[in-house]
Image (tube, grey):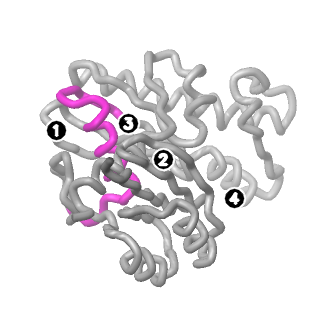
Amino acid sequence: MSLSKRTICLDLGNSLYKAALFVDGIQHDQYVLERNRTEALTALIDKTKPDSSILASVTDHPEEWETFLQSVTKFHKLSHSSILNFKPEINKPETIGADRIALIAGAMVQKPGTNVLVISLGTCITYNFLHQTGVFTGGSISPGMEMRFRAMHEQTSGLPEVKLNPEQLGWAVPLIGYDTVTAIQSGVVNGMVAEMDGLIERYSKKFEGPDIILTGGLSPYFAGLLKNRIFADSNLLFKGLYALSQLNCK
């Protein structure tokens, strides 16, 4: 009987450090790691015992993490120079974030031969377009939900700091705010919905299709607010990382 092949995929984002374990190509557990603590990484590796690992980072992280992963696994750090399952055709490909590379790789796995717009809801909202020919042509980036709340508080002298529990999305955010707090909540959430719906319509007019994939931590909550038909997949980035690990962790 052959041994199972285990791969750990690491997504080091601006807000969270996350990881997912794949066993023989099937995603199993997910983990949140304490930022910049090597002990957290070594504990994860001891627990999951992966054969290979892949790391996508958009933030500063300890260099010893890469050294450690390289010493105990077949390791790859994702970048624009990695072997990809799609073709990037943008200016300065070295500026593409590793998270966006992984998202497009995931879309290529999920929707091959299809025009796909991937919308990722994280610290920022990224819009990433994959042409049906397998070419990544670019997209756009705008502020995420928490960034919008924080900016209104920090850039004004009178607006309070407002937060929103994700479980409230879809039922407790009014269209017409009845006080300052609900007015800010309405502006942020309904503004994000209008932005996404508007860009989806513009992409749909320009390209045949496209299929829309909504991903990121807030995707389950915003999926029900958008008027356009979408596919919500909160694990798309990890699926892309795993696909790229198979190409690069030799």
The Cα atoms of the two marked residues, 2 and 4, are separated by: 17 Å
Q: Which residue is mark 1?
A: 134
Q: Is residue 115 magenta?
A: yes
Kind of residue at disc 2: Ser
Q: Is residue 227 magenta?
A: no
* Rendered residue at 45%/64% (across/down): 58
- Secondary structure type for disc 2: strand
Callout 2 touching callout 4 (CB < 8 Å): no
Q: Name the N-terminal-most of marks 3 and 1.
A: 3
Q: Name the N-terminal-most of marks 2 and 1.
A: 1
Question: Which mark is drawn over residue 142?
Answer: 2
Question: Which mark is drawn over residue 155?
Answer: 4
Q: Name the N-terminal-most of marks 3 and 2.
A: 3
Which of the two discs, 2 and 1, sits closer to the camera? Answer: 1
Q: Nearer the viewer, residue 142 or 84?
A: 84
| In the displayed structure image, the side of residue 91 where residue 227 appears, left or right | right
Which of the two discs, 4 and 3, sits closer to the camera? Answer: 3
Mark 3 surroundings within 10 Å by alpha-carbon count, few (fewer than 14), some (14 through 19), many (20 or more):
many
**Magenta residue span:** 92-117
| In the displayed structure image, the side of residue 5 where residue 248 appears, left or right | left
